[in-house]
Each structure stands twice: as C-alpha cells, then as structure tokens.
C-alpha cells in the first residue's frame, strides 16, 4: 500500500514543455484543474500528498516520476534523458532523502523514471523492467539494474517500441497482472504475467496507475475502463486532456512511496 505521494504543482511554463504529440497547446487553467483533481484522488485513497512548489525554469518538472525510481528500500535519483530536464533532480533530493537512502545514476547513463516499471511480487520475485528509449540508454539501465540487484530485484532491459516511455504502454494493475498495449503483449520479460490488452485505438489508456486497490485511468477510454471493470478492477476515471497534450500520463505525475 502507498502511504505518500510526491507531486509538483505545474508552473505557467508547463505549456511550453517538451512534447512529441500533436494534440494542440494545453490550456493552463484546465491543466492546473486536472492536476488538482489528480492530487485530490490520491489523497482520497489515503495518501499523504506532498506538493512541491512549481519550478518555472523547468517546464516539465511536474512529471515528478521521471527524476527518481523509488522502491520500498531505496530512491535512485535519475539522470533524465532530455537536457532541459536534467537539473530537475536537484529539486527532488531533499524531500526523498527524508524517506529513503539515495543513490544516483551517473554519466554516461541517462534514464527517465517513466521508463522503469517495478513490480513487487514479494512472494515470487521483485522485478524491475527498464525500457530503452530516447530518454533511457543502456548504461543508465545497467546502472539501475546493478543498484536494485543488491535488494533482490531481477532486472530486464527491453526496447521501447512506441510512445515516449515504457510506462506509456505497460503498467501493473495488481502484483501479477499488467495492462499492456498490443505491441508490448509479447515481450519475453512479461511472459509470466497475466495481461489485459487495451483495445485498438485506446493505447494512451495503458498509462494507468494502481493506487491502493483502485486503478486510476484517463477518462474517455470506455473500452479500457470496461475491460478493467469486467475483470474485477475498480477504476477511477481522471480528466487528463491537457496533461496528455504535453506527453504526460497518470504515472508520471507522482512519485509514490510505500
Ligand atoms: N513532457 C514530458 C516529457 O517530455 O518529459
């Protein structure tokens, strides 16, 4: 169960952040409203939400998940793949150091937290899957796997075949079930998991986040919501249209800590 979430308020500069999608320019007021909706949902699910102040000099800094990989044992501060995001890490260390020992990814490694899926099936194994993307390279992935191997995590490294990050396409919805896009269904390192596949045309909806027994899902994806509900998962639909315009999703908006 998660106890804390670290989020960062989006600054006015957030509308000028990085994006590779063609969904138009976000409306700042609506983006703030959607962010508030998200933090309220986390709080309603029992998390203490720690909201950090906006960082105008880093337009993408409200995607807090990209700057650290947090497990129950440790926090690994990343070296983000985009030059414009690298300095964000200096602004997350103080708060994370209150909860966990810190370790660091170093040059020539680059890695974004959005490319790292940790599944803790403590009764079977602890699993860390790292996607290689424009933001994450082999040295970054290897450094992370080496650090986490000390804590009993099996590391797997795969290519990200689509979208910005690995977790744009694959996320856990309980300790042995993943929600995946069709493209990622056959990845060898996912063979042991039960998998639900988002319907064609709803690939964005694979970016869901499990919070204490509920699955937060972007609204406007009825096929995926039905699929989850029919398989016994309780969902909460979240408005994220403006966040999606900045290549963002539900996972990357927070760092979640057990
Ligand atoms: N806008 C999110 C990112 O590109 O990192």
Image (spheres, rainbow, N blue to C red):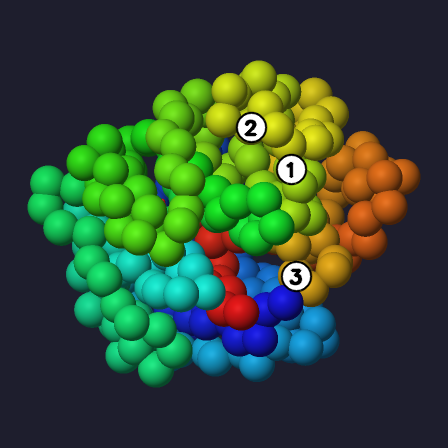
The residue sitting at the left extreme is: 107
In this picture, is 47 found above or below 231? below
In this picture, is 70 found above or below 4? above
Decide which of tag 3 and tag 1 comes sooner along the chain: 1
Q: Is residue 146 left or right of residue 95?
A: left
Q: Which mark is residue 186?
A: none
**What is the quadrant of the N terminus in the image?**
bottom right
Q: Which mark is residue 178?
A: 1
- Along the line of sight, which residue is nearer the eye, 43 or 152? 152
Which residue was labeled with disc 2?
A: 190
- Residue 213 image offset from top left, x and y in percent: 74, 60
- Residue 232 image offset from top left, x and y in percent: 86, 46
Pointer 3 local density, CA inside 10 Å: few below 14, some 14–19, many at least 20: many
- Along the line of sight, which residue is nearer the eye, 168 or 146? 146
Identify the residue shown where x is 33% and y is 47%.
Answer: 149
Q: Which mark is residue 211?
A: 3
Cα distance between the residues tagged 2 and 1: 9 Å
Identify the residue shown where x is 51% and y is 65%.
Answer: 256
Tag 2 and tag 1, C-beta contact below 8 Å = yes
Q: Is residue 13 left or right of residue 90?
A: right
Q: Ligand 1 closer than 8 Å to the CB at disc 3?
A: no
SS at badge 1: strand
Cα distance between the residues tagged 3 and 2: 21 Å
The residue sitting at the right extreme is: 230
Decide which of tag 2 and tag 1 comes sooner along the chain: 1
- Along the line of sight, which residue is nearer the eye, 111 or 91? 111
Identify the residue shown where x is 39% and y is 32%.
Answer: 156
């Amino acid at each position: 169960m998660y106890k804390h979430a670290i989020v960062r308020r989006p600054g006015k500069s957030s509308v000028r952040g990085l994006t590779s999608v063609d969904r138009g320019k976000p409306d700042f007021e609506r983006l703030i409203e959607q962010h508030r909706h998200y933090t309220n949902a986390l709080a309603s699910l029992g998390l203490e939400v720690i909201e950090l102040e906006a960082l105008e000099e880093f337009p993408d800094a409200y995607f807090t998940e990209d700057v650290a990989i947090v497990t129950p044992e440790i926090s690994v501060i990343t070296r983000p793949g985009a030059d414009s995001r690298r300095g964000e890490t200096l602004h997350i260390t103080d708060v994370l150091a209150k909860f966990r020992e810190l370790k660091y990814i170093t040059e020539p490694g680059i890695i974004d937290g959005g490319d790292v899926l940790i599944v803790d099936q403590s009764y079977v194994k602890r699993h860390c899957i790292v996607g290689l993307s424009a933001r994450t390279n082999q040295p970054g992935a290897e450094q992370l796997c080496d650090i986490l191997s000390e804590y009993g995590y099996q590391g797997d490294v795969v290519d990200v075949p689509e979208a910005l990050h690995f977790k744009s396409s694959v996320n856990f919805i309980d300790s042995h079930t993943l929600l995946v896009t069709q493209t990622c269904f056959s990845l060898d390192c996912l063979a042991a998991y039960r998998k639900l596949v988002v319907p064609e045309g709803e690939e964005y909806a694979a970016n869901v986040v499990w919070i204490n027994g509920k699955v937060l899902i972007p609204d406007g994806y009825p096929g995926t919501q039905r699929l989850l509900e029919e398989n016994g998962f309780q969902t909460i639909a979240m408005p994220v249209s403006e966040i999606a315009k900045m290549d963002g999703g539900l996972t990357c908006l927070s760092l979640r800590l057990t």
